[in-house]
Image (tube, rainbow, N blue to C red):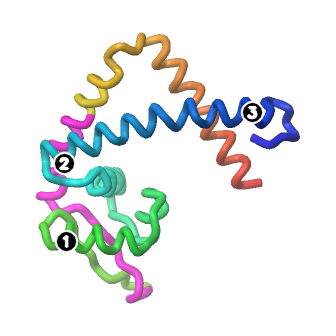
């Protein structure tokens, strides 16, 4: 949101950012702990599995980096470990042998399904005290924020 829109001043913007960041950071910390404790994996691994599960034909490494909002180097190491564990395949693109497509294996899809069920349950626990109307309102407001951010980036 730019200062030109007149929607909020700098102080209010900082307060909003902190109100958005703190709960997000706390939830992320709890999810990291639970993934490590229950499955012995990182939240990053789960996020990569989730992104690949949504992509029917897999993703190029660069596309995966973009979706995960991390560098190509971070994805390369993560995917190498997942290939070694039999969760994904990595094959050179036929159009450009320097680019690699990553896809879930059957074992990767099965692993993701188990983790996704646990993840959904954990989030239900975390948000259990949040009234349904508040959750719906937060969802609507964050959708509006995401739309605003996409518009700013495109413009």
Q: Which residue is drawn at 54% across and 18% down?
A: 137
The residue singled out by tag 3 in the image is 11
Seen in the picture, residue 100 relative to 70 is either above or below; the reply is: below
Residue 60 at x, y percent in the picture = 40, 71
**How far across and how far down the image is residue 39, in percent?**
13, 48
Q: Is mark 1 on a helix, strand or loop?
A: helix
Q: Is residue 148 left or right of residue 72?
A: right
Image location (x, y in percent) of residue 63: 45, 66
Residue in view at x 58 percent, y 35 percent:
18
The correct choice, above or below, for 22 with respect to 155 in the image is above
Mark 1, Cα crowd under 10 Å, few <14 / some 14-19 / many 20+, is: some
Q: What stretch is highlighted in magenta?
A: 96-119
- Considering the numbered disc 3 on the image, is that residue within a helix, a strand or a loop? helix
Q: Mark 2 or mark 3, which is nearer to you?
A: 3
Q: What quarter of the picture does the C terminus occupy?
A: bottom right
Residue 100: within the magenta? yes
Q: Does the magenta stretch include residue 17?
A: no
141 left or right, relative to 32:
right
Q: Are marks 1 and 2 in contact (CB under 8 Å)?
A: no
**Alpha-carbon span between mark 1 and mark 3:** 47 Å
Residue at (21%, 70%) from the top-left corner?
81
Task: State the quadrant of the N terminus.
Answer: top right
Residue 134 pos. (x, y %) = 49, 14
- Picture quadrant where residue 127 is located: top left
Mark count: 3
Quote the CA–CA distance across marks 1 and 2. 19 Å
Mark 1 lies on residue: 83
SS at circle 2: helix
Q: Which of marks 2 and 3 is nearer the N terminus?
A: 3
Q: Name the residue under label 2.
A: 36
């Amino acid at each position: 949101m730019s200062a030109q829109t007149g929607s909020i001043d700098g102080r209010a913007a900082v307060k909003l950012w902190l109100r958005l960041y703190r709960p997000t950071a706390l939830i992320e910390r709890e999810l990291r702990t639970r993934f490590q404790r229950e499955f012995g994996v990182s939240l990053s691994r789960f996020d990569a599995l989730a992104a690949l599960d949504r992509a029917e034909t897999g993703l190029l490494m660069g596309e995966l980096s973009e979706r995960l909002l991390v560098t190509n180097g971070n994805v390369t190491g993560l995917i190498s470990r997942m290939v070694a564990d039999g969760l994904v395949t990595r094959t050179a693109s036929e159009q450009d042998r320097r680019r690699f497509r990553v896809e879930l294996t059957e074992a990767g899809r099965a692993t993701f399904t188990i983790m996704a069920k646990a993840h959904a349950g954990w989030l239900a626990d975390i948000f259990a005290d949040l009234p349904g109307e508040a959750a719906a309102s937060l969802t609507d407001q964050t959708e509006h924020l995401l739309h605003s951010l996409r518009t700013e980036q495109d413009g």
